[in-house]
Amino acid sequence: MTETSQIQDARSREQALDATRSFIVQAPAGSGKTELLTQRYLVLLARVEHPEEIVSITFTNKAAGEMRDRVLTALNRGRDATPPETPHKRRTWELARAVLEQDARRGWQLAANPKRLRVRTIDALCAALTRAMPLTAGFGAEPGVVEDAQALYTEAARATIALLESAQKWSSAVERLLRHLDNNLMEVEQLLARMLARRDHWLRHVSGRSNPRLAREPLEAALQHVVADELVALVASVPAAEAGEIVTLADYAAANLQRTGASAPACACAGLTRLPGHTPGDLALWLGIASLLLTKDGTWRTKIDKGCGFPAPSSAKNKDEVQRFTQAKQAMTTLLKRLAEHDNFRVRLHALRQLPHIAYAEDQWQVLDALTVLLPLAAAQLSLVFRNHGRVDFVAVTHGALEALGSSEEPTDLALALDYRIRHILIDEFQDTSFSQYDLLERLTAGWEPGDGRTLFAVGDPMQSIYRFREAEVGLYLRARQEGIGSIRLEPLTLSVNFRSQGGIVDWVNFAFARVFPPIDDMTFGAVPYAPAIAHHPTAAGPAVTVHPQFDDSAEREAKNIVALVQAARDQDSQASVAILVRARGHLNAILPELKQAQIPFLALEIEPLGHRPVVQDLLALVRALEHSADRTAWLALLRAPWCGLALADLHALCADDGEATIWDLMNHAPRRARLSSDGQTRLKRVLEVLGECLAQRRRQPLRRAVEGAWFALGGPGCVVQAADLEDADIFLALLEELEEGGELRSVRTLEQRMAKLYALPAAAGAPNPVQIMTIHKAKGLEFDTVIVPGLAKSPRRSDKQLLLWAERPRPHGSADLLLAPVRASGKDEDPTY
């Protein structure tokens, strides 16, 4: 029996190589999806007339480079006369040889012209489309694309708020939002900037005041549909045998509560004669039943007393009341015991407490109405900011590509040309697709017909959608799997064999994550069930996964335990790889010092913020000093930097008794300089010469050149401790070059904000095989022999609030409800609709 026949998903893998059909493949981690993509690409290459007819789309440069290298490596190996022994490698070798024959027949010369392989990121594809039709794309001259456009979002948000004084029709909308958030300008600015970063999601919902979906009536109808749908599911979950008793006891408890003057939710059930229905008007009755049967935490009630409508028999006035009170409490106790078997009913009953109101409060509607005016306006302001700076973000590039292609009804010349040239599209990491990128795929395939020989092949893993890569929306993966993309119907395939981990790990993950993931698909909210994997490698001896419980929150004790685990793993096998993966970089605050103390070499990847490195701190002080002569702290830091190194006594002599003059003026004052020690005077003279020349040329040359030149002249590169410091300095200088305009910075604060998102390069470890330290996100796709995940007991950081939340809920007959909720007012309670 061959290895291929032993692989349980071998049939799906072979089907995926059918070049006449379109597929969407669910490929979990470790399932060999990159190899499958490579094989599919080779199959297509052997059939097409030109390599450019195939477009392979990825989401990162790294993935694109890896895919291209895989194809070229396969072609190189295909030139070997002897096939590999491993079945799957032999399959790749066979496919590569077929491509080489096609290459020879058609004279492609791929070895000499590898750029004919159109493997690119989706951003590179969009940029190419906008370059092809710059005017139609709305760009004109090609703008620069920035990875982090936060400063531009903030500028557009600030310009939107400034419209308050414009006396235009939208001034009142700005005023309404500011009043709603207690005139907190900084908060409004941050919230607007945050929304602009995600405009790919919401702009299609609010980009037209004439849109009938934005009227109050359909929006409130959508809220009512949510309530009704939940009530339908609740009614279906009620145990039929207990329905009568629930009604009887709810009526009994409500009557007792009303007699005491209580205002509990259960009072709504007074006079109840039958189980409530599933219309929004029945919600209050169901909430009354929920308060009767459940605690506030959603567990079945165990304490039955007068507080929930069941007076104690000892409080009865006569024997009849004693008997009635006793029987009621016994009946309630018996009912709760029987209901304990119906957990679905309990869950749905408790979920009612989270349902939205069926109508907006007036102040809530007013701010929602204001947001539907302001948000499109903020997006328009962002377009102006982009134009002024000659820079755009990735969302703008994608939208420009959409404009360049036109609509399916009115395609542009570019779309018609591409429709002729592109015959096959492959997409990697499809779960990372955003709304505009999904729209782009629909337009690229708009002219395709079933059976015309053109195919779409998408590979992804919705279970990895937690990464939310650049506003990715996993609901789009579910939509493509269920409905296809445009006119292209995709046959679903699932890879289940895991080639990466040993059987014990796979079994543990299957057991744990089946209980973590939701039970069913939900396209609206991106809910994806867990798909169990099948281990290709056998189970190794010993426990595959070990939990080390810690019953306190001592970070120091956890760090010591982790060091002990690392030492044990290295003692067992000094060549085995060990990784420490964290959800948040702050979880390493106690661990890194403990590793250093234990003299365990480690490599921390994107862990230490760039601004924490001394070389970058010194460069930042130099920038701040050159940008603002009155920045006293920056000038003092500059004089203490290694390239000057003034002693504290000399600094005190220079400026301690004069807090009014700038440090630069004091440095140029000869009597002041005479107060310094002879060593201090020598050091200061050298700094004066360099900085004097630099300030004389200020704004006459690019800021980077000025800063870098001064740093070199002062001997900065000679003061670094390790080689990685020079690379960190280069990262800082490149950021400075990106942010400067006309030889100066528009905002030092923006520079510091951007620096906060950059991380220093890892220092070279002092020994081979260091411990690898990184975030869980960064570890995606990597393999280690031992993995340690600390901080699992720590609560994740709360998501930042947004000005507007939205969701689309499919309705029968292809329609969809739009749900919108504005941020709660400052100082007010949480809004259930939000």
Image (cartoon, rainbow, N blue to C red):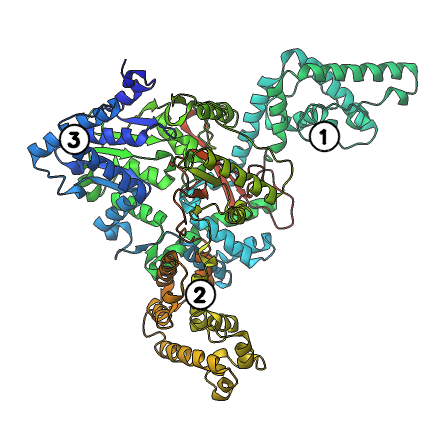
Q: Are marks 2 and 3 in contact (CB under 8 Å)?
A: no
Which amino acid does the dot numbered 3 rest on?
Gly
Residue 613 lies in what quarter of the image?
bottom left
Crowding near pointer 1: few (<14 within 10 Å), some, many (20+)? some
The residue at the far right in this view is 318
Q: Which mark is residue 78?
A: 3
Residue position for label 1? 265
Structural distance between the alpha carbons of marks 3 and 1: 74 Å
Point out residue 390 in the picture as x, y percentages from the top left corner.
32, 59
Q: Which mark is residue 620?
A: 2
Q: Is residue 208 visible?
A: no
Crowding near pointer 2: few (<14 within 10 Å), some, many (20+)? many
Q: Indicate which label's residue lies in the foreground, 3 or 1.
A: 3
Q: Nearer the viewer, residue 102 or 730?
A: 730
Mark 2, secondary structure of its residue: helix
User: Which sits earlier in the primary sequence, circle 2 or circle 3?
Assistant: 3
Which amino acid does the dot numbered 2 rest on?
Leu
Mark 1, secondary structure of its residue: helix
Structural distance between the alpha carbons of marks 1 and 2: 60 Å
The residue at the far bottom in this view is 671
Q: Is residue 522 visible?
A: yes
| Position above or below: 415 against 192 | above
282 sits left or right of 139 in the view: right
User: Which sits earlier in the primary sequence, circle 3 or circle 1?
Assistant: 3
Quadrant where the image shows the N terminus? top left
714 sits left or right of 416 in the view: right
Mark 3, secondary structure of its residue: helix
Which amino acid does the dot numbered 1 rest on?
Pro
